[in-house]
Image: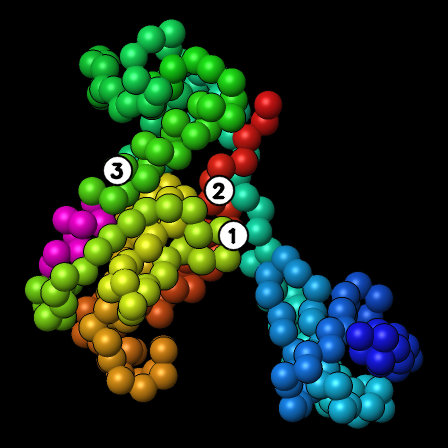
């Protein structure tokens, strides 16, 4: 461990001597299982310089010097996609979106923890997300549970069409918290599609893209995880899936992930 710490410090010094732009944040990480130097860049995070234990600081510096142009292009792109998640207040009138419909929050003193309610209006029906008044964290959890329940019902119904077309049998679904980096997942061992609950606050075409993405995995295509067979399945089901994927990266960065002001 001490050797790795010393190597990381020496590499960091070699990188600093390259005279890179001061706003480029590069973090050196020693990866014992790697055989070659690499770069990892994710929106909202520093650039990770992945270094195998056998690399020298000079070798790493040469690698970064060679990839300086790539970094110059990719770092601004990653900053544009950095998360800027929505923050909600649990007060009357706060806006929420669920399955492409907009709702206004209405706090109540009785009834279930969270429910959808429509009220007649002279111009158009008004849709309300009615939440029983409580501590902010309790109201937040009630709304998340509503997203999960409504999202699961939608996913099962919509998923049936893809199951029939893809010859998928015995598939299971769940809607839960998948963290800040994934919108969906497929488990081959459980034959289970998992969807992230905030997904259901995004436009419907993006929700369906994630659903189709995971269901394409459920067809068990041969080859790499997102290889040619998987891509063919996606193109068959959803010819514009690449455009939806790009849109998800931009729209998803402003999703409501459960953040709230207390």
Mark 3 neighbour class, 10 Å CA radius: few under 14, some 14 to 19, many 20 or more: some
Mark 2 neighbour class, 10 Å CA radius: few under 14, some 14 to 19, many 20 or more: many
Residue 128 shown left or right of residue 48 in the figure: left
Part of the protein shown in magenta: 154-161
Residue 89 shown left or right of residue 5 in the figure: left
Q: Is disc 3 placed on a helix, strand or loop?
A: helix
Vertical comparison of 186 with 15: above or below: above
Residue 202 disc label: none
Q: Nearer the viewer, residue 51 or 252?
A: 51
Report whether residue 43 is seen.
Answer: yes
Sequence-first tag of 2 and 3: 3
Q: Quarter of the image holding residue 55?
A: bottom right
Q: CA distance from mark 1 to mark 3?
A: 21 Å
Report whether residue 72 is seen.
Answer: no
Q: Which residue lies at the image location 51% right of the left edge and 46% below the top edge?
A: 254
Residue 180 disc label: 1
Q: Quarter of the image holding residue 87?
A: top right
List x then y, in percent, for residue 224: 36, 83
Residue indicated by mark 2: 257
> Where the C terminus falls, by quadrant?
top right
Residue indicated by mark 3: 150
Q: Dots 2 and 1: beta carbons under 8 Å? A: yes
Q: Quarter of the image holding residue 94?
A: top left
Sequence-first tag of 2 and 1: 1
């Amino acid at each position: 461990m001490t050797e790795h710490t010393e190597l990381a410090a020496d590499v960091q010094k070699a990188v600093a001597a390259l005279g890179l732009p001061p706003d480029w944040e590069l973090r050196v990480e020693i990866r014992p299982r790697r055989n070659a130097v690499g770069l990892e860049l994710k929106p909202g995070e520093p650039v990770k310089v992945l270094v195998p234990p056998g690399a020298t600081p000079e070798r790493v510096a040469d690698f970064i010097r060679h990839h300086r142009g790539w970094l110059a292009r990719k770092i601004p792109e990653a900053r544009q996609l950095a998360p800027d998640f929505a923050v909600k207040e649990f007060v009357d009138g706060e806006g929420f979106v669920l399955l492409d419909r907009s709702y206004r929050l209405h706090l109540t003193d009785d009834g279930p923890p969270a429910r959808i309610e429509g009220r007649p209006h002279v111009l158009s029906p008004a849709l309300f997300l009615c939440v029983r008044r409580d501590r902010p964290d309790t109201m937040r959890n009630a709304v998340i549970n509503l997203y999960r329940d409504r999202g699961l019902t939608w996913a099962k119904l919509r998923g049936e069409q893809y199951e029939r077309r893809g010859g998928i049998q015995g598939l299971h679904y769940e809607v839960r918290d998948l963290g800040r980096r994934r919108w969906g997942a497929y488990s081959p061992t459980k034959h289970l599609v998992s969807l992230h609950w905030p997904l259901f606050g995004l436009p419907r075409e993006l929700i369906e893209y994630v659903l189709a993405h995971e269901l394409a995995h459920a067809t068990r295509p041969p080859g790499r995880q997102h290889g040619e067979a998987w891509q063919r399945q996606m193109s068959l089901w959803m010819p514009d899936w690449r455009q939806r994927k790009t849109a998800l990266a931009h729209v998803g960065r402003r999703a409501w992930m459960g953040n709230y002001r207390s």
